[in-house]
Amino acid sequence: MNKPISLELYHHITQFLYHEAALLDDWQFRAWLDLLEDDLRYTMRTTVNAQTRDRRKSIQPPTTWIFNDSKSQLERRVARLETGMAWAEEPPSRTRHMISNCMISETDLPDVLSVRVNYLLTRSQKERDEMIYVGTRTDLLRRRSTAEGWGLCGREIILDQAVITSHNLSVLF
């Protein structure tokens, strides 16, 4: 177990994460982009299914990367959503980002904390298109001298699903 952090710091970090989730749910993508650091790595992969006998032999199937984006790639995704020509988001998805089990630890980098959360993302679109994404996420937050106090410099998302059945993956996690 890592060195405990103060309750005040825990509160500040969780409020930052809740604020970020609200921005995504409210389609405030430009404000969300302002929370991202220029050196951000934003990755997502699925869970890999492996037989017990293979795991014992340390044999793992290859990892399937869904996203491996930089801040500039995310800016392009947001710009496309803003054009009204992103057909995958017509009509726009309604999302709810829920996070829990927040565990915060220090890193070897100055002013950077590692934050692991469990998340649930629900997405509704049209009358009957509903999708639930569940997994764990590890964020790297860098201290900033801004109103939010933090900037996101890393996000690794690992879905519990081994196969994604959604017709597209145009929402932001």
Image (spheres, grey):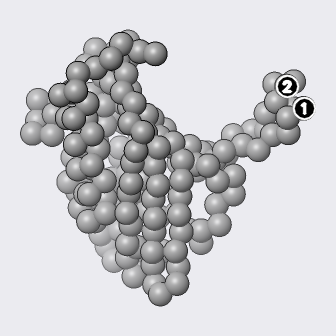
Q: In the picture shown, does residue 108 fall above or below 148?
A: above
Horizontal arrangement in the rendering, residue 170 relative to residue 4 (left or right): right
| Residue at the right extreme, as displayed | 53
Amino acid type shown at disc 1: Arg
Q: What separation in Å lies between label 1 and label 2 (alpha carbons)?
A: 5 Å
- Whether the residues at callouts 1 and 2 have beta carbons within 8 Å, the answer is yes
Q: Which residue is mark 1?
A: 53
Residue that appears at 35% across and 46% down: 72
- Number of labels in the image equals 2
**Could one spot residue 44 in this view of the protein?**
no
| Residue at the front extreme, as displayed | 7
The image quarter containing residue 71 is: top left
Residue that appears at 33% across and 17% down: 4
**Could one spot residue 47 in this view of the protein?**
yes
Q: Which residue is mark 2?
A: 56
- Report helix, strand or loop for mark 2: helix
Residue 52, given in percent of the width and then of the height, sits at 85, 35
Residue that appears at 38% across and 66% down: 95
Q: Name the foreground residue: 40 vs 16.
A: 16
Residue 15, given in percent of the width and then of the height, sits at 22, 43
Amino acid type shown at disc 2: Arg
Disc number for residue 26: none
Residue 59, given in percent of the width and then of the height, sits at 83, 29
Residue that appears at 20% across and 54% down: 31
- Report helix, strand or loop for mark 1: helix
Q: In the picture shown, does residue 157 fall above or below 127?
A: above
- For the residue carrying disc 2, how many other residues have a C-alpha within 10 Å: few (<14), some (14-19), or many (20+)? few
The image quarter containing residue 112 is: top left
- For the residue carrying disc 1, how many other residues have a C-alpha within 10 Å: few (<14), some (14-19), or many (20+)? few
Residue 114, given in percent of the width and then of the height, sits at 38, 27
Horizontal arrangement in the rendering, residue 47 relative to residue 111 (left or right): right
Horizontal arrangement in the rendering, residue 144 relative to residue 102 (left or right): left
